[in-house]
Each structure stands twice: as C-alpha cells, then as structure tokens.
Amino acid sequence: QSRDLQEAQAVLQQVFGYPSFRGLQAEVVAEAVAGRDALVLMPTGAGKSLCYQVPAIVRQRQGKGVTLVVSPLIALMHDQVGALEEVGVQAAFLNSSQDFEATKRIERALLAGELTLLYAAPERVTNARFQALLDSLHERGLLSLFAIDEAHCVSQWGHDFREDYLQLNLLHERYPEVPRLALTATADSHTRADMVERLQLQDAQVFISSFDRPNIRYRVVEKKDPRAQFLRFLYDEHRGDAGIVYCGSRKKVDETAEWLEQQGIKALPYHAGLDQAKRAKHQDRFLREDGVVMVATIAFGMGIDKPDVRFVAHLDLPKNIEGYYQETGRAGRDGEPANAWMAYGLADVVQQRRMIDESPAHEDFKRIQRSKLDALLALAESTDCRRQRLLAYFDEDSQPCGNCDNCLQPPAVWDATEPARMALSC
Ligand code: ADP
Ligand code: MG
Ligand code: ZN
C-alpha cells in the first residue's frame, strides 16, 4: 500500500514535474493503484486527470497493462494525449475523426501492450471491433483500469446527459474485475445517486473534496438593460481579460458576439449550431490568444483547462445551480481573483418555467427540473452570502465568505420577497 504511494509520488515528480499531490489526489491514487473502485467528486481545476493518469502509469509499470479513459469530448482527448506525449507517456486516442491508417496504428500499439493510456469516446464501447480488442487485452491480463471522466454525463438529472454513457456498464459487465474510477465535478445529490446506480458503483469508495472556489467573487445584478450593464462591468473590471459570456440561445450568442465586436472587444461565438471547424477554431483562439471573450451557449466549456479566465458572465439564467457552478467554475482556475457575474430577471424565470411546462418530458423529470430551478432562484434572490448557499446546495457547511456581492455590500433596498412571490405564482 505505502509502497504503491511511494511509486505514485515518484511518478508525479519524475513524469509530471509536480512536487506533491493536492487535496484528495493521493488518497484517490492509492485506491486506484490498489485496484479498488472509486467515485471522485472534485471541483473543476482540482486535478482529476492526475487521479487516473498516475495510477495508469504505476499499474502499467507493474505489468498490469493499459488504462482505458472514457471521455466525452474529442478536443479534450486530443489535448490530454498531446500533453501526456510531451512528458513521455505512451498515450493515444481512438475517435471518429481518425482515418483507417491511424486507427490501425493505434490498435497495433494497443495490442502490443505499448500504450499506458487509451482515450476513447463512450460510443466506442459498443463497437464490436473495439470490444474484440478489449477482449484480447483482457485475456492476457492487460486491461488495467477503466477511468470514466465527466461521469455525470450518465445522469439524466445532470446538465450534460449523453445517451452513450448509458452503455458504459458494458465495461463492468464484461470485465467485472477491472477496477473503475469515475470522476466528475458535479456533486449534486440527485446526480450523484443516479451516477452510482447507473454505473453500478455501490461498492466504490467515494471521495468528495470541498467545492469552494474562494477566489471567485459571485455577483448577481438585477437585469434591466443587460447589455449596458455587462459592458459597464467589462469596462470597469475586465478590459483586455479573457472571459466567457453565457447566453440562453444560439441566436443570442450570435447577436451578442457581433455586438461586442462592434464595441471593439475581441469576442467570438460558440454554440452547437456552428460547424465543427468553426467551433474548433474559436475554441483554439480562446485557449491560445490573450483576452478573447467567448460568447457561448452551455455547449462550450466542459473540460476546458484555461487557467486565466478572469470572468464568467451570465446574460441569461442558467438552468440550475449545478450548471451555474460548473459554468462559473471555469473562471480563475489559476487561483487568482476572478468574477462570476450574472444578470437576473423575472422574464428569464417565466421563460424557463414555460420551457419546463411545455417540454414533452416525464412529469417526474419536470418536477425535479422545477425544484432545481427554484433552488437557483433562491440563490439569485438571496440577500445573504451566496457562496454559503451555493456550497450548502452541495451539502457543504461554510461561513459567510466575505467575497460575494452580498457579503461585500449587504443589500438593504432590494426586497426579494415580491419577485419571489411573483415567480412562484407564474
Ligand atoms: P479537473 O479535471 O479536475 O478539472 P485537471 O485535471 O484538468 O482538473 O487539472 C487542472 C490543472 O491542475 C492542470 O493544469 C494540472 O496540471 C494541475 N494540477 C493537477 N494536480 C496538480 C498537482 N498535484 N500539482 C500541481 N498542479 C496540478
Ligand atoms: Mg477534467
Ligand atoms: Zn459571501
């Protein structure tokens, strides 16, 4: 056990060049190296990747074979594999963007036991050709570990549900003794329970770290003239900074990006309606250039590791607190001060309620969506510490933070009871 941890420590230092593990990383790594299932709930930026990358390397060195990493995003796999190759780790990914030759090359390396980590999209798991590869590795004892990244995608209660994630149980059913590590930045209790059930992780050790992001300053303003309000915020506090502006629709994304351009701000749109090449280009510019403002729907952001995003602004209401937390969490990953700014208005609430009411979803599902929306409204309308409320939603106790709008300027005039009452009656 402690020998494992020593080896893991050595890998961390020699391969990745980091002096020590952070937070719960060491515990998670020890669990995974030992071959026990684990469910890891850590906020964005906490360092979940190392939780499976280090065990993958240690176990490969012990002759246990390859770690399969399931990840929902092609761009992300690409980045991670590139970063691993740079530090000399044998890693590859399989996805639909590759030609036959490239695929064959990776498959050969995989079967020869040369790879330490193989990244694949979830839909790969149901592919017969891929299963034959896994079977072959498994028969020879070379299937070391399954890492399921962004595991909340398996839950319909979550905000990123992906049908393909439901198939991941196949891995467990076919190879029950291969240990699994499921990782997510979502700690909402509904989603967590759903994840455990759907991935059959009842026996997994659960690791939950604090979800607090102390350097993020939360602020909610009453939505009046959101463009003017946002521009003032931008000019006063974030000239030349990189940031993300979330809007509720594709159309609004396009309009807002164009309008910001006209104001002389380097803004780019991002949403699922843009073609793949354009999305990739915009994401790339956001990551590599300084001071790009990405105007986006929630299609943008999962897994984005850009340390110096200085603000996240919501021009429209997110769907729930999980979404809000995830989206705002993309700010300030470098630990430096960052702002989470949201314009909140009743019209948004009315619209979201209508969308839920009119959706063809099951009534149970709608009920949960409504209660989640209500929790977000309570946060938006609260006159006490926002961070405390946010963390309380994730079952975490805390004290007033001193770094949110309500802590810094206790509200006296804004009476929340009236809009709240109206919101509940509409
Ligand atoms: P997550 O998946 O939890 O959002 P990542 O795995 O993308 O986070 O890691 C975020 C950043 O933190 C990365 O740049 C990573 O290299 C860095 N990091 C992770 N663990 C450590 C550590 N122990 N020491 C130093 N940097 C770390
Ligand atoms: Mg991650
Ligand atoms: Zn506070």
Image: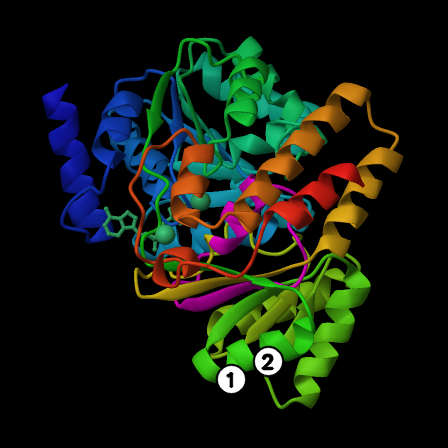
* Residue 343 drawn at (x, y percent): 61, 62
Give yes or no for residue 422 being in the magenta stretch.
no
Q: Is residue 314 magenta?
A: yes
Q: Is residue 60 above or below residue 425?
A: above
Tell how many labels: 2
Q: Which residue is mark 1?
A: 235
Q: Position of residue 178 (x, y in %)?
A: 42, 15
Residue sitting at x 68%, y 26% = 368
Give the residue type that dot 1 points to.
Tyr
Report crowding for label 2: few under 14, some 14 to 19, many 20 or more residues within 10 A (C-alpha). some
Q: CA distance from mark 2 to mark 1?
A: 6 Å
**Whole-percent x, y for residue 28 in the image:** 28, 28
Which colour style is shown? Answer: rainbow
**What is the magenta range?**
305-328
Give whichever of 305, 142 is nearer the camera: 305
Viewer-proximal residue among 258 and 121:
258
The answer to which quarter of the image holds residue 114 is top left
In which quadrant of the rendered view does residue 194 lie? top right
Give the class, few, some or many, for how many residues have Cα within 10 Å of label 1's Cα (few <14, many ≥20). few
In the image, is residue 405 above or below residue 418?
below
At horizontal 47% and vertical 59% (from top left) the residue drawn is: 412
Q: Does 350 sit above or below residue 338?
A: above
Q: CB of mark 2 within 8 Å of CB of mark 1?
A: yes
Instruction: Name the residue tied to disc 2.
Output: 231
